[in-house]
Every structure is written in C-alpha cells, then in structure tokens.
Amino acid sequence: MNKTKNQYINREISWLKFNERVLQESADKENVPLIERLRFLGIFSNNLDEFFKVRYATVKRIVNAGKKGKSELGGQKAKDLLEEITTEVIRLQAKSVEILGQVEDELRDEGIFIVKENELSERQQAFAKQYFLDKVSPVLMTIILGDETDFPTLKDTAAYLAVRMQLQAEEENVVPGLQYALIEIPKGVDRFVVLPKEDGNDCIIILDDLIRYNLGTIFNMFPFESISAHMIKITRDAELDIDNDLSKSFIEKISSSVDHRKMSDPVRFVYDKSIASDTLQFLKGKMGIEDTDSVIPGGRYHNRRDYMGFPSLGRKDLMYAPIEPLPVKGLDAEGSILEQIAHKDYMIYTPYQSFSYVIRFLREAALDPKVKAIKLTVYRLANNSQVAASLINAAKNGKQVTVQIELQARFDEQANIAYAEQLQAEGIRLIFGVPGLKVHSKICLVEREEAQGLKRYGFISTGNFNESTAKIYTDYTVFTAHEGILKDLGKVFEFFDANYLLKKYKHLLVSPHYTKGAFREMIDQEIENAQAGKEAYIKVKMNSLTSYKMVDKLYEASRAGVKVQLIVRGICCLIPGVEGMSENIEAISVVDKFLEHPRLYIFGNGGDPQVYISSADWMTRNLDYRVEVSCPIYDEDVKQELLDTFEISWRDNVKARVFSASQDNAYLRDDRPKVRSQFASYDYYQAKLGE
C-alpha cells in the first residue's frame, strides 16, 4: 500500500485530542457532578504541563538539531508541527477558560462564590489580611527585578505573579518610572482559601488574589502610584540527560539528572493576556524566550492543575459518590490466598474490586515460614506504600527479597530513589534495570518450599502496585500458580540480572525481544482465518496506539476482512473507517470518572479466543525499548470475565467518543439503552457476587 499523508494521525496532535476529551468532562453538565468538573479542568491543565515537558520538548530538540523529523513524526515536519501544536493549545486554553467561567456561574447558583480581591466584605478583608500575615507572608518568595540584575531561574511550572509598579518621585533618590518584581506562588499553602461565609454562602478566594489584595503590604517600601500583578509560568524540557561518569552509582546519576531538569531549557511560556505590553516584553527579553518556544496567552490564573484539589466544602451532592471496592467471588477473605490460588486463578479489576488482595498476598508471603523468596518489579509506588512495607517485613523475616526498581519512571524518579535507599537499607536486594531499557512490567513471583518441592505463586498486572492510584485507575491483576507461566516469570527476573543472555519463553510475551513479533503472528493468523472464510476478529483495549508497524498490520488485517475493535484511551495514530484501508476497523475512547489503564488483547483464533493482559501498549517504546510482560489467560472463568468487561466497555454509549479522520471527539450515540461502562462494570461484579 502506498504511504500517504493521511495514513496516520500525528501522535502529538492525537494526544492533544485526548486531552480535549478530558476537557469535555469538565463541560458535561448531565453526567459529571459540578465540583468534579472543576477537578477535570485541573487534570486537563496538569496533562498539558506534562505534554510540554515531554512531547513538545522532544519535537523542539529535533528542530534545534537541524532535523526535519518526518520519519519520527508520521510525515510531518517538526517545525510545522510546533506551530500546529501552539495553535491547537491556544484553542484548547481558550475553551478551558470559557468552561471555567460556566462552571463558576453554576457554582454561584449552588451558593459557592469564588471571589476576587476587590469583592471582599469587611469581615473577609480582615480575614484575608490576617491569613496573609500568618500563613502566606512567612513563605513568600519575592524578587525585585532591575535592568542590571540577573534574572532568576524560574522553576518549572511554578506560577509567578509579575508585578508592575509605577513609581512616583515623592522621595529623594527615587526616579519616576517602572519597577518590576516577581512573586512566586507558594506551593506549601492551599491554592484555594476558604473565607468566612457571607449570607449563608460559601466563599473562596484563590491564593493569587489573596496575594494581590496584600500587594500594598508586600511593597510598602516603594512609593508607587499604581501597582498590578499578572500571572506567568514557564514549562521546561523534562528529558533526563544521564552522564557517563563511571565513578557514580546509577542512583547518583539519576539524582543528578533530575536536579539538572530544574535548569533545563524552557519550552513554553504562558502569560495573562491582560498583562501590560511593556511588562511582557521586559520578561521575554530577560528570559530569552525563543521563536521555537510556545508562547501562550492565557487567562488570569495559571497552574489550573490545582483545581484537582478544589475543596469539597462538604457538598457531597456535587461530587461523585465513592464506591466500595467489591470482594472477589470465591476468594475467601479469611483463608490463605496462596492455598486458594494453588487450585485456581483469580483476577481483580480495580477499582471495582479491592486492591487489598495484592497487599494480603504480599503480607502472607512475608509471614509464611515456607516462603523462601519474593521477587517484584516496581515502577510507581504510593506514598507510605503498603507494598514496600510488606517487602521490608518479608526481609526482616529472613526471606530473600529482590526488587527490580525503575529509577527512570517519568516524574517519579525522586520518589523511587528514596524507596530504593529505604529498601536497600533493610537488606532487600535491588536491581536497577537493564541498560538502554526501561522496565515497565508489573510482575511478582513467590517461591515456597512445599512437600512436593519448590512451588511458585505470583501475579501479573496491567497497572502499578500502588494502592493510591488503584482507587482511580482501572487495571487487571491476575493471581496464578500456573507452573509454566511462573517459570517464565523467573526467567524475566534472571534477564534483569544477566541481560546479555537472551531467554526463551513458552507462555509469556516479553519485550523487547518477542512481543511485537508474537502479536503480529496472531494478527497474521486472523488474516489467514478471514481469507479461509472463517470468523476472524481482533479486540484490543489499550492506552495508546502509536507504533506505525502495528497500525500498518491492522490495516492489512482490515483489508483481509478481519473485524477489528479498538478501545484506546489516549493517543491513536490509526485512522479507522477509511475505504480500502481500514473500513473493518472501529475505534472508540472512553474517558470518565476513572482513568482507563488496562491493556487487553483478544484474538478470535478460530473460535477459541486467545486472551492476553499486558503492561505494554502498542507503542514503539513499549515494544522495542522496554521490558514488558504480556500474559496469556488460561483459566476459563478469568477469560470470560475479560471478554465480558471488554464488551461492556465496547457498548458504552454515554462516555465513549468515536475516533475518525475528522478527530472531532464526537460522542458515540445510538438507540440502544444507555450503557456507561465504568458504572456498568461495577454492576457486573456486584451481580456476580449474587450468582
């Protein structure tokens, strides 16, 4: 097939379209509670920050290297892409400001007022002054700017108020003119300050405005006749540049690289569009903003990611009702998990079912005298992790505990370094990964001495072993005592130790050596079945689809008549429904209350479906540059659960959006009864308990 510019969606543009789906949640009056809509605005803003730190920065590096980058960017020139990204971000930012205004109007209808510094009552003014003196002033960082002074290094994505003072010559040695200053919005103080109520209404002032109210106090030593403050922020390149100093440990190298990130080049400059032009030019000149940087005019407030922590004010009616994680049918909460897994595989689907089974599994292994060894991979752990505590407990009980910890987990490097040092101090053996590869697999292996000899137990997951994110990310975790699968897991841990030895696996698909080839072979089998007139289908649920080779393979399957159903939460470079290329492919994205995170692969296989859960998306990085594990599902009950939950997601006609060439994020609407898959999945498991 001839390559055309319309064969793929650019991954950066597709990511921005995903974030627009997040933004759609903040505008959904019918299905999303009011305070939750504000929090989705925060998620949208946080996502955008990370996009500029990582993806925009990568494209900018290509431009700065004098390259076009067309092969890496799906046929688009890097310089043109930077301009397109900036245009799209300006559109989305304007849309987010408009939605924020609508949400604030609705909050007022509910008796919740977000007031500005010039709207305070007398009682609130007194409160704002005292709160500032007690809580804000002691931690406020204020920098006076001048033509002769060096401009300070602004922190990545920190918010600053750019202060402009018009000075008057009432005192000796004061030259009339402009004086500039910067105030860093302190992170240790709540961004939303709850004020005394007025007429029974809840009132909140944003910290920025509380500081604006107290500008006279801050700058009382300057004889100004007017003073104003407008928000600015920059985003820096977040790529880690790891040095090759052989005298440093890997932990030292990562620590140094994370520190260097604080000084890396800026890639985005956002400012309040009402800022005075002389102030803007002064700042841009001092900061050395370049043509390849994205300069975004924005609203009055930046760092809207803080809306993720908007106070609940006790208004449960304006938030999602919390769900109580369900037990797993047949898995006795009181009995030994290891003994039960010895007879049958079990699966948990968080957050619908309880993550506590993972903790109980590890705690039991830590205490069981027959357990000799525990091996686990770590990518992201929770604060005060119960997983880490269980591993330390195991080590204290004399178990051989081995943890492969990924120090390069994006934006979790410092947390993982701290855990690595803590685990190492407790006598746990650490493996820091494979040179040139990130370890992204989610696996655990337990070895137990039993009467018949060594017996293995373990679990494989699509998500991180993190009890905090398990409450808001949907993920599958399968517990098994299948000897073949667990022997393969043992080989994965051996590969971490001796990665110069290429292992062979009978059951697992392991990146970077086998995953892509194995999935392509399964697609080829579906193509053969379709050509032979048999039923042929592929059903996939994943976070992102960016590998052009896998996209091309799905196009090939579509042309052969294979029916392909894709549920892709985030980036999708494939264009479905194009005659002669992808007319047998349908693709949707579900964005709702929880973050859709599982990877599930289903192949028709002539009536005997092959089903895999995986840590890997079909992205080049997951297939070629990471250690990932995809696990076949042999237990028929677990397999049926996975097939059922896929179908529930596929039938979503409330929160599903349809992928198309137009990339308009249109909601899937049809005449069937309404199915909101995340709520329906919980109902499915609740019903199973009653069977």
Image (cartoon, grey):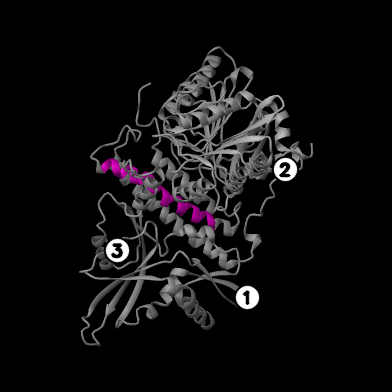
The residue singled out by tag 3 in the image is 152
Q: Is 277 drawn above or below residue 367 in the view shown?
A: below
Q: For residue 675, what is the image quadrant?
A: top right
The residue singled out by tag 2 in the image is 327
Residue 191 image position (x, y, % from top left): 49, 66
Viewer-proximal residue among 601 and 119: 601
Mark 1 vs mark 2: give the one in front: 2
**Crowd tier of the residue under label 3, counting other residues whose Cα lies within 10 Å: few below 14, some 14–19, many 20 or above:** few
Q: Which residues are magenta?
A: 38-63
Q: CA distance from mark 3 to mark 2?
A: 54 Å
Pointers 3 and 2 in contact (C-beta within 8 Å): no
683 vs 380, left or right, is right
Q: Amino acid at mark 2?
A: Pro
Mark closest to the chain's N terminus, 3 or 2: 3
Viewer-proximal residue among 558 and 325: 325
The residue singled out by tag 1 in the image is 200
Residue 102 image position (x, y, % from top left): 51, 61
Q: CA distance from mark 1 to mark 2?
A: 42 Å
Q: Amino acid at mark 1?
A: Gly
Q: Which mark is residue 627?
A: none
